[in-house]
Amino acid sequence: MKKIVLIIICCFLSWDVAAGDKELFRQVYDLLLNEYIEDVEFPTFFDPLFSSIEREDKDIDIVAGASTVTIYYKGKIHKVYAYPTEPKNAKKWAEFTDFLLTEVKKISPVLAHKDFELAEVMLYDGTRRFDKNMKYFPILDVGQKQEKIQAYNAGLQENGILYIRLGTINDYTTGEIIKTFKQFPSPKGIILDLRENKGGYLKQALDIADVFLSKGLMIYTIGKNQGKRKNYVAEDGELYKGIPMVVLVDGQTASAAEVIALSLQKNKRATIVGAQTYGKGTVQNIYKLENEAHLALTTEKFFGFGEFSVENIGMRPDVCSVVFNQEDDDMDKIVASGTEFECPQISRHSDFDLDVAEYILKKTN
């Protein structure tokens, strides 16, 4: 199996005794300052971070201003605190965060009994409010073993076309495709169904795309500065070489699934059929924290040929089958429709999309 290393696991020194909330916040803030895809100003991070505290005790209100943070209790100002004078000093801001937590617990009987779990609550809830793709995992199961059966389905149809359904993308997917190749090495065509596939890790997506490619740039990523561009190029060893292929997508095809579709489309390896995809063009790397938790941090954006990004837009299929239905029997007209109209970003798990895919493969043969 081809190896493409992408997911970065940063392991820190183990501690005999937990370093406490200050160390945890320092590590998260360091990552935000140095690895997050955009420059972060801590006041903008404070609002979502402390909003979870307010939900734990409705009498608490914490307002982050331009240079100060104000703590309200039962509608009245408790105290106003000035921010640290060093805007990029993660240690100072971690100490400030820990100090605010201590002050809040002094005036709130509800929060006083929460102790160390408050930091967990803040990071779990606050990071997602700051960036919907950023996640704090107290426990991270990267194996996704429960999804193994549901995630993959493949079989040779009566017409000789191999249908492969990827419900999600995980560590097992590439291996399952290789097993399918050994079982059905010479189909008349391939339909790779990525509809409603919300993705997985980028490395896994590139491994899958690479199975169907022997050369060419799949995608490239760019981090916080332009000097962090990384190219991901297909290696030799393509399975199903020369066998025509169609990929089905819809409005819920996202993230790593979009990487697969984009890589195969831009290398002219497959015809894409369905609807405009979801449009998640960012990459999350996984970092291990000192408390054994993990942080999925947005660190890069991915692009196809010509600096194309799917972020907030999605990718357009070659054939927008979702605007047609079974009453439209002129398949040649449907296949040739191209970009004549806007392709909606909807989810439609229709057999008609399969009919269009089969027709394209039949015409190719």
Image: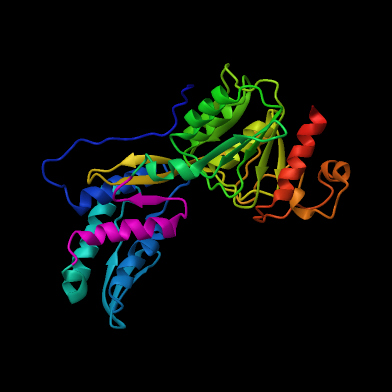
Tell me if residue 240 comes above or below residue 6 in the rendering: above
Q: Residue at x 27, y 43 (%)?
A: 289
Q: Quadrant of residue 356?
A: top right
Instruction: Give the magenta-colored segment's residue range.
Output: 114-140
Q: Residue at x 58, y 30 (%)?
A: 209
Tell me if residue 175 comes above or below residue 294 in the rendering: above
- Pick the front one: 28 or 142: 142
- Pick the front one: 142 or 359: 359
Tell me if residue 263 comes above or below residue 330 in the rendering: above
* Residue 160 on the magenta span: no
Q: Residue at x 19, y 66 (%)?
A: 114
Q: Specify whether 39 is left or right of 208.
A: left
Q: Quadrant of residue 245?
A: top right
Q: Is residue 233 visible?
A: no
Tell me if residue 166 comes above or below residue 233 in the rendering: below
Q: Is residue 24 visible?
A: yes
- Pick the front one: 49 or 79: 49
Question: Residue 168 at x, y = what percent?
Answer: 51, 44
Q: How is the image coloured?
A: rainbow
